[in-house]
Amino acid sequence: MRRSTFRAASSRAVQCAGTRPGVAKRFRHAAIFGALDALHSGETMRFVNDHDPMPLLDQLRSRYGEGISIEYRRREPGAIAIDFAVR
């Protein structure tokens, strides 16, 4: 089962409801967009996943452009951690 975890600037880990089995990808991505929309300039959200979310990253770049930075903190098979920072 794929698991995604978000870690906001407060270091409080929140598991995305959209990672439950049977939830369509379009809802998982919407949850991520909602979490990012709630961040203020200068805040960072850490995304942890078991696979490299390339389609999601393309969507984030398209949606937020230069308003967000995307930085891999860990990029190994089965262990991905990415920081999304709002500018």
Image (cartoon, helix red, strand yellow):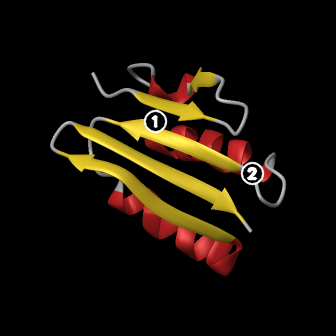
Q: Which badge, 2 or 1, is on the more N-terminal residue?
A: 1
Location of residue 30 (image quadrant): top right
The x, y position of residue 34, in whole percent, is: 72, 45
The local secondary structure at tag 2 comes to loop
How far apart in space, not on screen, are marks 2 and 1 (Cα)? Answer: 28 Å
Disc 1 crowd, CA 10 A, few/some/many (<14, 14-19, 20+): few
* Identity of the residue drawn at 63% across and 78% down: 65
Foreground pick, 84 / 4: 84
* Identity of the residue drawn at 54% across and 42% down: 46
Location of residue 22 (image quadrant): top left
Q: Is 23 left or right of 74, judged from the image as shown?
A: right
Disc 2 crowd, CA 10 A, few/some/many (<14, 14-19, 20+): some
The amino acid type found where label 2 is placed reads Glu
Can you name the residue that lies furthest to the bottom here? 66
Q: Where 17 falls versus 73 (above or below)?
A: above
Q: Where 51 falls versus 43 (above or below)?
A: above
The x, y position of residue 18, in whole percent, is: 53, 29
Q: Can you identify the residue that label 1 sits on?
A: 24
The local secondary structure at tag 1 comes to loop
Q: Can you identify the residue that label 2 sits on?
A: 43
The amino acid type found where label 1 is placed reads Ala
Q: Which of marks 2 and 1 is in front?
A: 2
The x, y position of residue 78, in whole percent, is: 19, 36
Image quarter of the C terminus: bottom right
Q: Is 53 left or right of 77, judged from the image as shown?
A: right
Q: Which mark is residue 72?
A: none
The x, y position of residue 24, in whole percent, is: 46, 36
* Identity of the residue drawn at 39% across and 44% down: 81
